[in-house]
Image: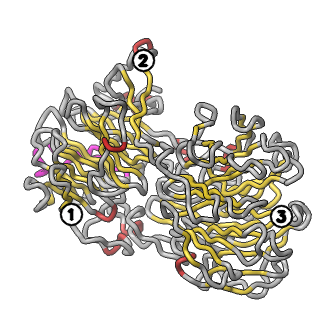
């Protein structure tokens, strides 16, 4: 099984699938502790002729950055959160990747085309919608030939970029809203300006090392007027903290040389969380903002930010504020404004009332409106990139862009074998590795139960599939009847509750594994390991709590303003589990808080075999027993999501081997 956030599915033709994990050279101490771990690397000559073959599915994935080009009605760009930059020259009918092999990271947080020279495109890497499995970026990239080639343009340590704005008359004058590191303090945050097309940058507005810029609006009536939204936010594996004293709105009237914090009449009391801001092109001095606060909502100023009034407090406009909070003003009609949340919402009366616009997929993140024709728009959501030419009455399709993100991939033993995956916000899919027809078509795919985040465990013949979902849900899917039965362990959906109230804790992505020795035996992992021998109708705990069970890390998540408990932040859980293919009853587990356990008798007795050189609180993301020796297992762990953890392992995963059921280990060479 491969664990990752992959975009689309691909196979290597000509050789059996391989898992490649990068690690750190082992230290002398680790080498001395290792008993007999050896690593045989494949001869590069054997791999030279291999090619990847896409098998689909051609379904859109999460997009948080989009733009069109004024004056070129058919031309659009979109940036995926794991798939780089895409381009359409036919109003979204077809999309082509234009950055493959040229960007060092895949998550796009912002994209902007210079109005005065459409060949110039700036891309900010690293999305600012900070999911628990967020991917970081590496700064700014620039193209001067409409996306044919790209070069890195600095700000490498900004990690997450929320917005880019380019002066309408000068393609070399560019501003970046940099949010900074997600999992700890960092210095490279705030608003940056370049006067030389990205060759050099100056930080022109900063607050502190835990607050960054998340949105940036340029007045279409006067490009020297800028509004910047700052967001104090931090994630840990067990919490999201959205909001604090650093969150605020700022304004500049001199192109960013000086700034004023807006605290005018009508703004809500603090603390604030995430903020979105936009300036109307239809009325001078009209500014809209959507603010996460106890008394938050949509606010409007008709005097360029001096005074404000709350025009709407509907929770539908500010739910899950950390993930949404986007607002865009119509470039011509001052009373038309859009708020992007779970739904795409539009107001035609200056923000007083909003109505939803039908879109192919929910969770909306970015919107570009043609300044010359507001009926023409491009929108990005969790299902991909869509285009409208009639003000949202109809949209282009999302099944023409293979950018869906996969949490997990596993195969069955059919011939040809089928590949199963759980796609972010798209549910599960079973897809053949090849067919006897003309390619692999959508009619060859099917949903196999569960939902977006879960493990998938098919029987070898694929007739029955166990598929997971968040909050501990397990579905038993029968492909012969097309029926799915809820066979969850416990409890019924605890959505909204923090981990402190759970009898058993199941992570957003919790292991579900079939025994390689008996397909009627299924394992499911919470903070303890469960076993079923009757297809999930009953479950028996076969372990104690195999985590650190640190009560200080078991609480509600979301921060001081908006709670957000979906099990993403449920901590002290088993995150990886596998049974030896060599010997029945040899079970290995790895936890998200850095413990590794093994049992040799099917769960009657457990031993802590955590590698001695594994940094404390590391996430064990995958564990694979040796196919040759029951006493050897390999594990992949990371430490990037701990406060300060990026400085320990620099966000690189680690592959360790334990031998003879011991706590000894050896890191693989690079």
Q: Is residue 625 magenta?
A: no
Mark 2 / mark 3, whichever is N-terminal: 2
Is residue 208 at all visible to an observer of this figure? no
- Relative placement, left or right, of 517 versus 242 is left
Q: Residues within 10 Å of mark 1 (few under 14, many from 20)?
A: many
Instruction: Give the x, y percent position of residue 151.
Output: 72, 34
Residue 600 lies in the magenta stretch:
yes
Q: CA distance from mark 1 to mark 3?
A: 54 Å
Residue to which mark 1 is pinned: 488
Depth check: give the residue in front, 89 or 485. Answer: 89
Residue at 73% over, 81% down? 300
Q: Residue at x 51, y 44 (%)?
A: 401
Residue 413 location, x and y as percent? 20, 34
**Residue in the picture at 63% in, 67% down:** 326
Toward which corner of the image does residue 415 lie, by quadrant? Answer: top left
Q: What's drawn in magenta, residue-wise?
A: 594-609
Mark 1 or 3: the one toward you: 3
The residue that mark 3 highlights is 220
**Picture quarter with the N terminus:** top left
**In this image, 355 relative to 653: left or right?**
right
Vertical arrangement, residue 531 with respect to residue 149, above or below: below
| Alpha carbon distance from label 2 to label 3 | 53 Å
Residue bearing the label numbered 2? 47
The nearer-to-camera label among 2 and 3 is 3
- Helix, strand or loop under label 1: loop
């Amino acid at each position: 099984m491969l664990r990752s956030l992959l975009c689309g599915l691909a196979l290597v033709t000509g050789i059996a699938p391989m898992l490649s994990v990068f690690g750190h050279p082992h230290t002398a101490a680790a080498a001395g502790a290792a008993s007999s771990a050896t690593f045989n690397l494949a001869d590069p000559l054997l791999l030279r002729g291999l090619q990847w073959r896409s098998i689909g599915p051609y379904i859109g994935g999460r997009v948080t950055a989009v733009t069109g080009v004024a004056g070129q009605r058919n031309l659009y760009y979109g940036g995926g959160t794991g798939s780089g930059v895409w381009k359409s020259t036919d109003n979204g009918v077809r999309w082509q990747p234009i950055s493959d092999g040229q960007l060092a990271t895949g998550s796009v947080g912002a994209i902007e085309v210079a109005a005065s020279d459409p060949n110039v495109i700036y891309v900010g890497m690293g999305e600012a919608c900070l999911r628990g499995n967020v991917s970081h970026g590496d700064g700014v990239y620039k193209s001067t030939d409409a996306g044919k080639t790209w070069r890195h343009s600095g700000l490498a340590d900004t990690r997450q970029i929320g917005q880019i704005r380019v002066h309408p008359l000068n393609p070399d004058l560019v501003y970046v809203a940099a949010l900074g590191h997600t999992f700890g303090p960092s210095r490279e945050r705030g608003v940056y300006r370049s006067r030389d097309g990205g060759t050099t940058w100056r930080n022109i507005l900063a607050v502190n090392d835990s607050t960054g810029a998340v949105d940036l609006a340029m007045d279409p009536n006067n490009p020297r007027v800028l509004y910047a939204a700052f967001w104090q936010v931090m994630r840990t594996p067990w919490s999201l903290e959205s909001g604090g004293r650093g969150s605020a709105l700022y304004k500049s009237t001199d192109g960013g040389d000086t700034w004023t914090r807006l605290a005018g009449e009508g703004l809500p009391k603090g603390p604030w969380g995430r903020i979105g801001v936009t300036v109307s092109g239809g009325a001078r001095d009209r500014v809209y903002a959507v603010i996460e606060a106890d008394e938050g909502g949509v606010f409007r100023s008709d005097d360029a930010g001096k005074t404000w009034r709350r025009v709407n407090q509907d929770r539908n406009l500010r739910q899950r504020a950390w993930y949404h909070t986007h607002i865009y003003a119509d470039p011509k009609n001052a009373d038309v404004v859009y708020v992007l949340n779970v739904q795409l919402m539009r107001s035609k009366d200056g923000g007083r009332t909003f109505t939803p616009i039908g879109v192919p997929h929910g969770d909306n993140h970015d919107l570009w409106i043609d300044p010359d024709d507001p009926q023409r728009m491009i929108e990005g959501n969790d299902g991909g990139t869509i285009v409208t030419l009639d003000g949202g009455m109809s949209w282009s399709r999302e099944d023409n862009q293979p950018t869906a993100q996969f949490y997990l991939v596993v195969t069955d033993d059919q011939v040809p074998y089928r590949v199963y995956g759980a796609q972010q916000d798209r549910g599960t899919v079973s897809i053949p590795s090849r067919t006897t027809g003309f390619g692999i078509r959508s009619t060859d795919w099917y949903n196999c139960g569960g939902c977006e985040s879960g493990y998938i465990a098919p029987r070898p013949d694929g007739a029955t599939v166990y598929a997971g979902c968040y909050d501990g849900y397990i579905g038993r899917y029968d492909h012969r009847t097309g029926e799915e039965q809820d066979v969850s362990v416990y409890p019924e959906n605890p959505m909204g509750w923090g981990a402190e109230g759970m009898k058993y804790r199941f992570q957003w992505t919790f292991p579900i594994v079939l025994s390689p020795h008996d397909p009627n035996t299924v394992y499911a992992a919470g903070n303890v390991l469960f076993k079923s021998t009757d297809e999930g109708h009953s479950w028996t705990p076969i372990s104690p709590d195999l985590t650190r069970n640190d009560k200080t890390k078991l609480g509600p998540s979301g921060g001081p303003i908006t709670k957000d408990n979906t099990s993403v932040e449920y901590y002290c859980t088993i995150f990886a589990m596998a049974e030896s293919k060599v010997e029945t009853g040899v079970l290995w587990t790895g936890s998200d808080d850095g413990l590794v356990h093994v049992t040799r008798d099917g769960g009657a007795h457990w031993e802590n075999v955590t590698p001695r050189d594994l940094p404390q609180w590391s996430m064990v993301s995958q564990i694979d027993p040796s196919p040759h020796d029951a006493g050897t297992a390999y594990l992949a762990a990371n430490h990037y999501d701990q406060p300060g953890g990026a400085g320990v392992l620099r966000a690189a995963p680690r592959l360790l081997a334990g031998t003879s059921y011991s706590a000894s280990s050896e890191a693989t060479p690079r």
